[in-house]
Amino acid sequence: MAFVNWLKRNLVVIAGLLTLAYLLLPNLVVTIFSFNKPKGRFNYEWQEFSTAAWQDPCGVSDLCGSLSLSLQIAFWATLGATLLGTMIAFALVRYRFRARGAVNSLIFLPMAMPEVVMAASLLTLFLNMGAQLGFWTILIAHIMFCLSFVVTAVKARVMSMDPRLEQAAQDLYAGPVQTFVRVTLPIAAPGIAAGALLAFALSFDDFIITNFNAGSTVTFPMFVWGSAQRGTPVQINVIGTAMFVVAVLFVLASMVIGSRRNKQKA
Amino acid sequence: MTNDTSGDVRLSGIAKTYGSFTAVHPLDLTVPQGSFFALLGASGCGKTTTLRMIAGLEEPSSGTVHLGDQDVTALPPYKRPVNTVFQSYALFPHLDIFENVAFGLRRRGIKSVKKQVEDMLELVQLGEQARKKPHQLSGGQQQRVAVARALINHPKVLLLDEPLGALDLKLRRQMQLELKRIQTEVGITFVHVTHDQEEAMTMADTVAVMNAGRVEQLGSPTDLYENPRTTFVANFLGTSNFIEAEVDSKSGDDIVLKAGGGKLVLPEARCSAPTATGGKVLVGVRPEKISLTPADDAGEIPEGRNRITGRIADSSFIGVSTQYVVDSPVCSGFEVYAQNIDRDSRLVPGAEVVLHWNPAHTFGLDAAQSLLAGTTGSAGIQEEAAV
Amino acid sequence: MATLTEAPPPLTPTAPEKKPPRKRGRLVPYWLLLPGILWLLVFFALPMIYQASTSVQTGSLEEGYKVTWHFATYWDALSEYYPQFLRSVLYAGSATILCLILGYPLAYLIAFRAGRWKNLIMILVIAPFFTSFLIRTLAWKTILADGGPVVGALNTLHVLDVTSWLGMTSGDRVLATPLAVVCGLTYNFLPFMVLPLYTSLERIDGRLHEAAGDLYAKPITTFRKVTFPLSMPGVVSGTLLTFIPAAGDYVNADLLGSTDTRMVGNVIQTQFLRILDYPTAAALSFILMAAILVMVTVYIRRSGTEDLV
């Protein structure tokens, strides 16, 4: 009876943890299979333990090239989308202007549109213009779909900012430029950082839009897609695992540093 | 007061309109160097707009702002020798207390700020908190940081926008005295915006009561309280009783008025209404100036006092005093505050009484205005009450 | 002393102080908007128009296409590919409902029950994002492999009998069946459900639960009458964020499904990139867009949550 009661009380916790397990299971599989030594071309069945792939992560031709291309595209797309998105967010929060509703819709629609629709229509445009598909068309597409997410993240932060802070800065002898650099930007920074991080993740991991607009250029997700047809090298799992570990460590480290800094100040 | 006028604030014909709405009607005002000046009024009366025009955060639609002899109307806020203590303080959340206070000095390119900032933090008793972030401080401490951050720049004028609004009552009283002390110590001009009449009266040398974008009356706190010139001022500062009366005759410096069946005397100097015989005048008197005597003892009231009769409708005991509501033929709901020195057991609801007071405490107002202006519930105060 | 040279004014009721429009630099907002909005107009809005125009063109790759207002393309596309459309709606709908059922307890756990583990669980929800989703989707091939432990367990528990009867699986296989596709879609878009749910749950004042308990509500009633209604904004945006991308997805159907599980995304992809029948592909894409927009609008209207962004 006590057990039944305990179960009743913690049903939500158990269900939640099961969902969490569901979310993490594939990562576990990816990690385990990064130590596999598959027979044949596909790495779907466990054979025997091996660290061969970890010792030679770039051992498959084009893999590291595609990875570096994806990182480059993600970097520039993040930069572009963050810059343009932050400007739009400031305009939306701080100023009154005509066509605000239209601007809001234009920001919202890319987020409410299936990727395949955007991908296909953008390809139509590029074909009509006779554009050479490759690095630049991918970059253009990535900035386009990351933009809205940056606007949303920055807007939320700037909206919660007290306009009196900037007035106080002006009152304390800071000119417009100094006010922006010393007060506005530092306070909006977490929102901008969140937007940039999101843009980076979206761009780096994007497949559908890239698939349509890449031509013969191969980004990392495209490489994985291709290998799913031709044969999956273990190195894919190595890189997937490494990315996961680096990301978790990065977040944990920033949290530890953040809490330590707070403690020092307190 | 000194002869130095570099800290004078002179507003000439200054006005602010937003589209068809006039926030501040053309206004002329001089705040002399070294004074503690309060702009008092309900929210939306234009007091904050006036303050922001002095700070440069708002462009006047017309008129000029002078600081001493300098016309600063066209100067942006960061070029004016004026600093503001903002409503809810506007402390920079990403900077610690030290950097908040040093902000103005650094922006003016001063390199060695340590000594000055530390001295200033000592003055407001926050030396220990220099490396904390604003959110780690209590409301009262944040308020003192805001004052320190402004004062360290040695502004010619310090502007305070409802600086105590976010504090609880007890702390507010304490900070009122504190601010007054700092003002006396540094001797610069303070312009203080508030909706709290008690705060304005305890702190300021001069109070300007604002209503609907205009200054209703300006003067020392006692002057405003004892001799209000409009019903708005009479009601906004404390409580007033009004009797509608008609001018009967004049005798010397006094006006004799008819109200109901009786006569009331009012010094002419204390009447802001036209006093032609037969004209209507609103006679006002503060509740604490009135004495209550049971009708049976009416004979003991000295000659020469204004008197009216009535019946006690309600009484409430509040410790130092008892507040009575008296219905009389000339005015229902007359308020009377009696000090509890000798309590007369006959003064209970239902008792017939005579209300009497020294004619010198009577004031006369133009009868052509609302009796309710400035009271809670009238148009001007409604939003305030909602807050 | 202070002087005042103004007569006492007539008394008028006051209006509230309004926010001033900025006078200085009236063009600033337009300059700030210009580059980003231009980008969206040229690379988002304009392509939609191109696509609309392509969908009513006829011609061939060799001779070029011309606008002939050939609306029959839409009819042909719909009559040929309606099963794929239906499948998209069915799979995406099932995945959305599964996401809600699976995601709600997790969001609730993070919001109210996690205590000091809250941040860690939050990281674990987001962290998978940092491994390419294609790699993670491929991992499902291993997890659901024929004769693997998962399939074995489902078989022993006779779950597969039920799903077979429903037409979701066939025989002893899960891979290459609709169930695998729905499972992959659910997995891929689950975080998009959990995060908005968590955001709106976290805003709920914990004392409301106590108040409901105080007013004689059983825990289940508290959930039904207080918690769930208050989390509606999260439910609405979560379902939208799951359904929209799931309906247009073709990766899961391709990697985990078979030719019998093709969704409309697969058709668009093949038509565009392999068969190069641009008008049909454009028409399909346009129908998908219109269908999604209509559904989203109706859904937002009915759930009464207008401000999702």
Image: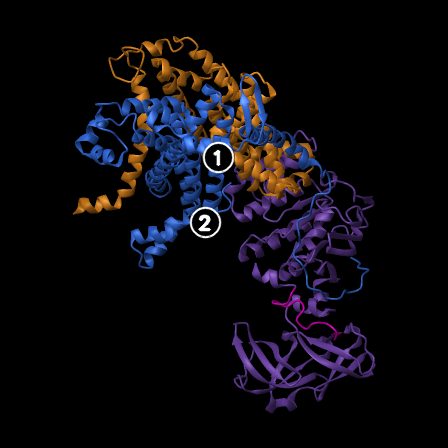
Chain colours: A orange, B purple, C blue
Kindly identify which chain the residue marked by label 2 belongs to.
C
Q: Which picture quadrant has residue C299? A: top left
Taking depth in this image into account, of C224 and C282 the one nearest to the observer is C282
Q: Amino acid at mark 1?
A: Ile
In the image, residue A216 lies in the stretch drawn in magenta: no
Which residue occupies the foreground of this view, C275 or A146?
C275
In contact (CB < 8 Å): disc 1 and disc 2:
no
Where residue C211 sits, quadrant-wise, is bottom left
> In the image, what residue type sits under mark 2?
Arg
x, y percent for residue A221 = 43, 20
Which residue shows up at 40% across the image and 50% down it?
Answer: C229
The relative height of residue A232 versus residue C288 in the rendered view (above or below) is: above
- Principal secondary structure, stretch drawn in magenta: loop
Q: Is residue C122 visible?
A: no
- Residue at horizontal 60 percent and vertical 60 percent from the top: B384
Q: Which residues are magenta?
A: B365-379
The one of B211 and C200 positioned closer to us in this rendering: C200
Residue C170, percent from left and from top:
24, 29
Which is more foreground, mark 1 or mark 2? 1
Residue B360 at x, y = what percent?
73, 76
Q: Could you confirm whether marks 1 and 2 are on the same chain?
A: yes
Binning the other alpha carbons within 10 Å of mark 2 as few (below 14), some (14 to 19) or many (20 upward) gives few
Question: Foreground: C281 or C132?
Answer: C281
Left or right of A238 in this view: B295? right
| Label at residue B74 | none
Residue hosting label 2: C302
Q: Which residue is mark 1?
A: C287
Q: Residues within 10 Å of mark 1 (few under 14, many from 20)?
A: some
